Image (cartoon, rainbow, N blue to C red):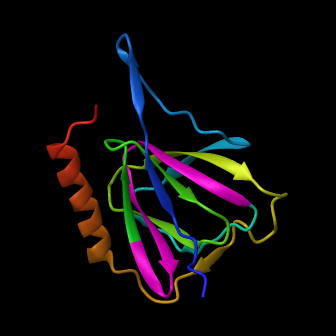
Amino acid sequence: MNKPRGITIRHLESIKGGMAQFFTPQASNETMLVQVPPNAVDDLFVHKSQTDQILVVKGEFVLVTLIDRKYQYIPLSEKQPAVAIIPPGVLHGAINFSSEACVVVNAVLRHRPVQPLDYVTRGRPFPYDLEAAKSALENLKTISTSAPIL
């Protein structure tokens, strides 16, 4: 049996030029700016035609994926620059526990023209474990306060 493809996290490297810090650029066919609303719990959806490359530029949220009938909760934050790579066919959603919107850049890789169902939500086959999602986000905050980004 083939293992299902999941979400990959790639931490960004940076170089300093004067006062600015430059992070690894992402190749893409198009780039979208996305806002995840405050206090949002999004249903799952899946893209058949694209790979998402998501980078949080303001705020934080939890990316949710469903693989083998188990949710995985992946915290992402502007304080830990990392790209979440979501290949076609992977169910995913978002949870924003904050009272502030989270701003995300999505460097989309197109594999074929957009399909009608690419942006239709699929619901949730069973409820998210919001405590596990909050815990994942708290763990990321603990890491970001104890290990400075260089």
Asked whether residue 52 is drawn in magenta, I would say: yes
Residue at 19% from the left image edge and 42% from the top image edge:
147
Residue 67 spot, x, y in % from top left? 51, 80
* Residue 18 quadrant: top left
Does residue 84 lie above or below 122 as drawn? Answer: above
Residue 39 shown in magenta: no
The main secondary structure of the magenta stretch is: strand
Q: Dividing the image into 4 quarters, which one contains the N terminus? A: bottom right
Tally the marks: 0
Task: Please state the extent of the stretch shown in magenta in the rendering.
Answer: 50-72
Left or right of 57 in this view: 49:
right
Report x, y in % for residue 34. Answer: 56, 48
Q: Quadrant of the C terminus?
A: top left
Residue furthest front in the image: 1
Question: Is residue 61 something that shows in the picture?
Answer: yes
Where is 135 relative to 28, above or below? Answer: below
Image spot of residue 127 (x, y percent): 42, 85
Residue nearer the viewer, 87 or 120: 87
Q: Is residue 15 left or right of residue 122?
A: left
Query: Measuring 57% from the left and 77% from the top, which residue is drawn there?
Result: 4
In the rendered structure, the answer to whether residue 75 lies left or right of residue 138 reads right
Q: Tell me: residue 143, above or below residue 33.
A: below
Question: Is residue 39 visible to the viewer in this orientation of the structure?
Answer: no
Is 27 on the left-hand or right-hand side of 92?
A: right
Residue 32 position, x and y percent, is 63, 44
Q: Quadrant of residue 128?
A: bottom left
Q: In percent of the image, x 45 and y 69: which residue is there?
A: 64
